[in-house]
Image (tube, grey):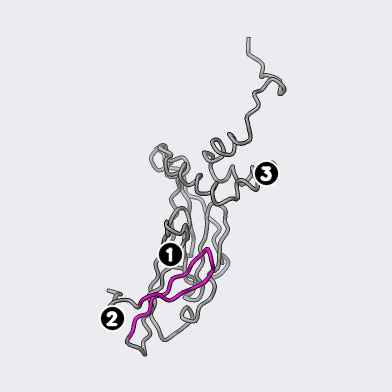
Amino acid sequence: MEELPAPLELLPHLPNELIILEILPRLPVKSLLKFRCVSKSWLSSISTPHFIKAHLEKSSQNKDHSHHSLIAHSSAPHIAFKNCSVQSLLQQPVTHATNVNYPVANTSSSISVVGSCNGLICIFVNCEQIHIWNPSTTKSNTLNDSDFIREKHCYTIYGFGHDEMNDDYNVVAIINPLNRVKIETKVYSLKTDTWRRIDDFPGLLPFD
């Protein structure tokens, strides 16, 4: 005889702390986005930097790669970002990649990928705008504009990474003004949404 599920009143009650600290950090992002609607306390807990960091650590320790995705960028015949589960890539047959909505998806502007770190992707749009984009949540931050981004008389290369000491995401810009000898270096902080200039790059041609 098939065993019937236990009535709700007989199910064990799990402490909220156990759910927040041990269960939710092990779930995929898509599930967490839905669970934010369960209660105000869950919404508040899931949105804290501490929870986000804990979830990232749990995901990186996931041995079956069920939380990991590969994002591919193509520019021909048109600009597109594709998402494919890493777990599916290790199996046969391989699951088809799906389209991912990205910032300014309705534009025909050129897009280049600066870099990626901890699930965030930094993209450069039409040599005018820089976005830090989270494909899992589809949210993005447009970097606070700086005079050199739109400057046509300079050549700039960018890098993107995480500053573990300050728990901040940074974009580094190495700027070569064509009418000057010095090569400037500026760093953007996602935490403060500001650019600051640091010591000039030691040398004249770092671009090779």
In this view, the residue farthest toward the front is 165
Image disc number at residue 204: 2
Image disc number at residue 113: 1
Of labels 2 and 3, earlier in sequence is: 3
Between the C-alphas of marks 1 and 2, the distance is 25 Å
Disc nearest the viewer among 1 and 2? 2
Q: Look at label 3 and name its amino acid.
A: Ser
Q: Is residue 208 above or below residue 20?
A: below
Q: Look at label 2 and name its amino acid.
A: Leu
Which residue was labeled with disc 3?
A: 41
Secondary structure of residue under mark 2: loop
Give the percent coordinates (x, y) of residue 165: 42, 57
| Magenta region, main secondary structure | strand
Between the C-alphas of marks 2 and 3, the distance is 54 Å
Q: Identify which residue is drawn at 51% across, 64% down.
A: 190
In this view, the residue farthest toward the top is 1
- In front here: 5 or 54? 54
Give the percent coordinates (x, y) of residue 179: 37, 90
Secondary structure of residue under mark 3: helix
- In front here: 160 or 40? 40
Give the percent coordinates (x, y) of residue 115: 41, 62
Give the image quarter of residue 86: top left
Give the image quarter of residue 156: bottom left
